[in-house]
Image (spheres, rainbow, N blue to C red):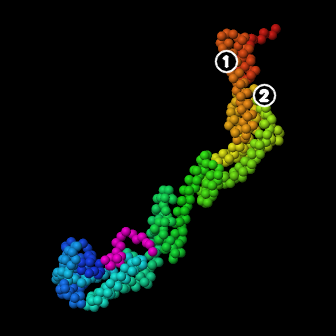
């Protein structure tokens, strides 16, 4: 089980394992600088002579010691011990069989997981092995051994030691879970974007998940944390999708896929996403019907225009086709007014083109009859951009009308400029003729004003 204690005075059972029992020259509790006094009581099992048998070894109790062994040279150097009475005694390393520092459970601040419990057991086993081999050590090491066994029993009874105190496992787990949750909440809030923080694989979250397996309260806390994180990540993803959908270059199939992703991200969580989905669903039905209708009307329009061979008059559509295009135009007007996603307008290009052609040809009938070719040019230029979405016949007819219109405008311009030159030269009569010829091509108001200026005044009526 994972847990994350505060970075404090944690001293676990591994401290005991490192400092309790070691043979001469095999381990040190602190660097053997020859000066540092280690104020830890214990016993030393020492042989009378370096060559003596271990069975001849005796037990000597000390209160503190200094390690003056030679680093890198087994059996070299010595230990200096201080006895209870304050006497000092130097013992060569070669005579030391075991040096045992009494384990002190008060120095162990945390026993919270299986590994900690096993470290306790390892130390207990080592001390028992010393007693078995050196029975004379029993009187000295059994009291601290009993303390270690008491610590192990508390853990086995369902408690844990945290910051030096034994508490119930439930209380510890709840405290740890609360600390983890606070840390995770802070990290989630700080993460920009939220998805940059990998909550599902974070060790703290995995620890919470493990805790929640045995605690309904922690399970609810973990679920709340995951829900909060999920909401932030979904908001981030929805924002990215809405930005993508606002791009007019995104194709309709790609936009449809993006909307499917948006719908899977609980769009009701924010008003903008919810409104977009509603607009998309409403517009999709309209788009589908208008695309089908536009395809049929485009074919009909192409059929009727194939019979049109004149370039000096706007084509007149059949009443049935004109009515059908007008009905489609009403639908498209409503769709455009709803400010749909740009992909809808892209998908409606044929429908918009058919509507533009139907209304445009109807306007051109009046415009051509009134010889308003300057106005006709602007309308035809717009239609020329629409006809490729309808068909070749529509393009042919509009191109022919553009050519005729351009010819009329060129003729009007030529006659007007000639009239101006003549007028500026004082040739009023010739200028008047040219202006009248220009006016007959395009009845422009400015030309009419020039004609009025050049015409001789009518004689006054007799009194």
Report if residue 144 is visible in the image.
yes
Report if residue 143 is visible in the image.
no
Q: Residues within 10 Å of mark 1 (few under 14, many from 20)?
A: some
Residue indicated by mark 1 = 417
N-terminal of the two: label 1 or label 2? Answer: 2
Q: Which picture quadrant has residue 168? A: bottom left
> Mark on residue 369?
2
Which x, y percent locates residue 450?
Answer: 70, 17
**Residue closest to the eye, 422 or 32:** 32
Q: Which residues are magenta?
A: 1-18
Q: Is residue 11 magenta?
A: yes
Q: Horizontal placement of 32 versus 107: left or right?
A: left
Vertical placement of residue 31 versus 317, above or below: below
Residue ID at (63%, 49%): 251
Please identify the residue farthest to the top as the structure is shown: 462
Residue ID at (83%, 39%): 319
């Amino acid at each position: 089980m994972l847990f994350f204690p505060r970075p404090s005075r944690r001293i676990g059972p591994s401290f005991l394992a490192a400092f309790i029992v070691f043979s001469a020259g095999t381990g040190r509790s602190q660097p053997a600088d020859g000066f540092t006094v280690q104020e830890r009581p214990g016993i030393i099992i020492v042989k009378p002579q370096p060559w003596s048998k271990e069975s001849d070894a005796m037990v000597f109790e000390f209160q503190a010691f200094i390690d003056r062994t030679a680093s890198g040279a087994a059996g070299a150097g010595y230990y200096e011990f201080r006895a209870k009475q304050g006497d000092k005694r130097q013992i060569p390393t070669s005579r030391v069989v075991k040096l045992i520092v009494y384990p002190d459970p008060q120095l162990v601040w945390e026993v919270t997981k299986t590994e900690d419990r096993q470290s306790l057991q390892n130390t207990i086993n080592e001390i028992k092995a010393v007693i078995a081999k050196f029975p004379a050590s029993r009187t000295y090491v059994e009291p601290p051994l009993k303390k270690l066994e008491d610590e192990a029993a508390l853990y086995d009874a369902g408690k844990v030691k945290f910051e030096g105190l034994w508490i119930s496992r439930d209380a510890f787990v709840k405290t740890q879970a609360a600390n983890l949750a606070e840390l995770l909440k802070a990290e989630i809030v700080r993460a920009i974007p939220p998805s940059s923080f990998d909550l599902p694989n974070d060790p703290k979250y995995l620890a919470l998940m493990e805790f929640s397996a045995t605690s309904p309260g922690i399970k609810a806390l973990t679920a709340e944390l995951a829900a909060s994180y999920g909401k932030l990540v979904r908001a981030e993803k929805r924002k990215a999708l809405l930005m993508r959908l606002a791009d007019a270059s995104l194709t309709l199939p790609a936009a449809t896929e993006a909307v499917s992703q948006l719908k899977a991200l609980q769009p009701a969580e924010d008003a903008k996403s919810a409104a977009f989905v509603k607009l998309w669903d409403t517009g999709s039905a309209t788009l589908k019907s208008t695309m089908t209708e536009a395809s049929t009307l485009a074919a009909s329009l192409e059929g009727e225009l194939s019979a049109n061979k004149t370039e000096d008059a706007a084509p007149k559509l059949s009443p049935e086709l004109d009515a059908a295009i007008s009905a489609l135009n009403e639908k498209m007007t409503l769709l455009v007014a709803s400010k749909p996603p740009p992909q809808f307008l892209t998908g409606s290009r044929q429908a918009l083109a058919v509507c533009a052609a139907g209304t445009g040809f109807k306007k051109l009938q009046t415009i051509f009859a009134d010889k308003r070719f300057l106005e006709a040019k602007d309308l035809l230029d717009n239609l020329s951009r629409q006809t490729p979405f309808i068909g070749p016949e529509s393009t042919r007819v509009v191109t022919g009308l553009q050519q005729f219109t351009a010819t009329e405008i060129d003729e009007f311009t030529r006659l007007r400029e000639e009239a101006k030159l003549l007028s500026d030269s004082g040739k009023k009569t010739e200028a008047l003729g040219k202006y009248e010829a220009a006016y007959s091509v395009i009845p422009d108001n400015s030309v009419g004003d020039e004609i009025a200026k050049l015409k001789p005044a009518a004689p006054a009526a007799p009194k």
